[in-house]
């Protein structure tokens, strides 16, 4: 969706923020949070990066009910100087980058309906808060997200937002991390999804490829289904070092004119953690 297609709703401020309206959630909406929270909390130990579990703990994210952004922001502010602010849905890139650059994470204030339990297009409060916010309590990841916002402002000047968006996608949304105990998930798109938190780690279908910034910036991604490739970082410190402490301008010019890489494609230089069968994507293609 192009930015010009997103219209700032009436009632949203200049920076697109709106009141969370915590008092307006219905018992059914709070119950939906609890249901999603239970399902993921049971799934995650042994699957998610330890930093994520630590974040849940520090922020005391739990049941019962949808968190109040003011309370959450107070704890998050103490941990890393971040806040959570409510927005109506997707916001334009420049607005998104500006919030991140100022250590404000934007979150939808609505929660999915029972019909949308496992799939919805716009990020709701469960994806945004449960998926994204715990890692913002980690000082290194907190700096990474701010640097991404600053990098977005620069990428816009280079016409390279698409490249930078791939970095966000394959790390913040769908990243895997290598630990002494094996691969773990940390991307919010995985962590907030019941199906993908199993698929991304255990399924034989997807590729799991060692993180390589230039390679990743050439790789297209899927927005409609589980990923066909995941990229594996060694640590958050290493991710921050390799990416946003680096000036991307020379990388953007090197990459101009290079061919994109398909989501499932492997290259000879890839450091493979696992070579995927792509059985899942192929079975979907047959029935499509
Ligand atoms: N808006 N609310 C919201 N949440 C996002 O994750 C988001 C957005 N606008 C733009 C955007 N993400 C990305 O496309 C940028 O990283 C480029
Ligand atoms: Fe997200």
Image: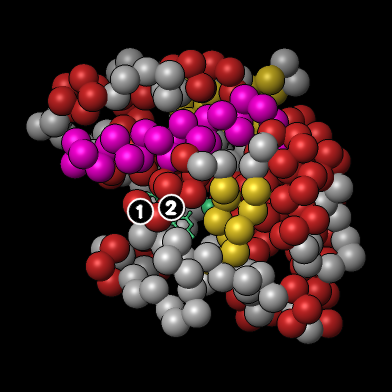
Query: For residue 257, which quarter of the picture?
Result: top left
The residue beneath circle 1 is 93
Q: Is residue 73 left or right of residue 95?
A: right
Most common secondary structure along the magenta stretch: helix
Range of magenta residues: 137-159
Q: Is mark 1 within 8 Å of ligand 1?
A: yes
**Pointer 1 and pointer 2: residues touching (CB < 8 Å)?**
yes
Is residue 224 among what the camera can see? Answer: no
How many circles with numbers are drawn on the protein? 2
What quarter of the picture does the C terminus occupy?
bottom left
Is residue 144 among what the camera can see? Answer: yes
Q: Secondary structure at mark 1?
A: helix
What label sits on residue 96 in the rendered view? 2
Taking the view exactly as shown, the residue that stands out farthest to the front is 14
- Please give the name of the residue rendered at 56% of the width and 29% of the height, measured from the top-left corner: 143
What quarter of the picture does the N terminus occupy?
bottom left
């Amino acid at each position: 969706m192009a930015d010009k297609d997103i219209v700032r709703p009436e009632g949203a401020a200049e920076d697109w923020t709106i009141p969370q309206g915590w008092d307006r959630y219905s018992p059914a909406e709070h119950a939906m949070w609890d249901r999603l929270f239970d399902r993921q909390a049971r799934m995650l130990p042994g699957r998610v990066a330890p930093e994520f579990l630590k974040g849940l703990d520090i922020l005391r994210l739990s049941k019962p009910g949808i968190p109040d952004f003011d309370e959450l922001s107070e704890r998050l502010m103490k941990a890393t100087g971040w806040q959570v602010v409510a927005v109506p849905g997707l916001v334009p890139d420049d607005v998104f980058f500006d919030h991140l650059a100022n250590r404000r994470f934007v979150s939808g204030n609505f929660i999915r309906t029972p019909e949308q339990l496992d799939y919805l297009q716009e990020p709701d409060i469960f994806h945004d808060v449960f998926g994204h916010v715990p890692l913002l309590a980690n000082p290194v990841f907190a700096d990474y997200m701010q640097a991404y916002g600053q990098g977005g402002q620069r990428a816009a000047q280079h016409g390279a937002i698409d490249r930078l968006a791939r970095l966000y996608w394959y790390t913040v949304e769908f990243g895997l991390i290598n630990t002494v105990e094996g691969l773990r998930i940390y991307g919010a798109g995985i962590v907030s999804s019941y199906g993908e938190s199993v698929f991304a780690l255990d399924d034989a279908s997807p590729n799991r490829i060692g993180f390589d910034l230039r390679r990743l910036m050439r790789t297209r991604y899927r927005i409609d289904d589980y990923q066909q490739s995941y990229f594996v970082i060694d640590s958050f410190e290493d991710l921050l070092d390799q990416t946003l402490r680096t000036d991307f301008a020379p990388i953007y010019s090197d990459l101009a004119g290079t061919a994109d890489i398909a989501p499932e494609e492997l290259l000879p230089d890839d450091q493979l953690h696992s070579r995927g069968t792509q059985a899942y994507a192929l079975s979907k293609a047959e029935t499509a």
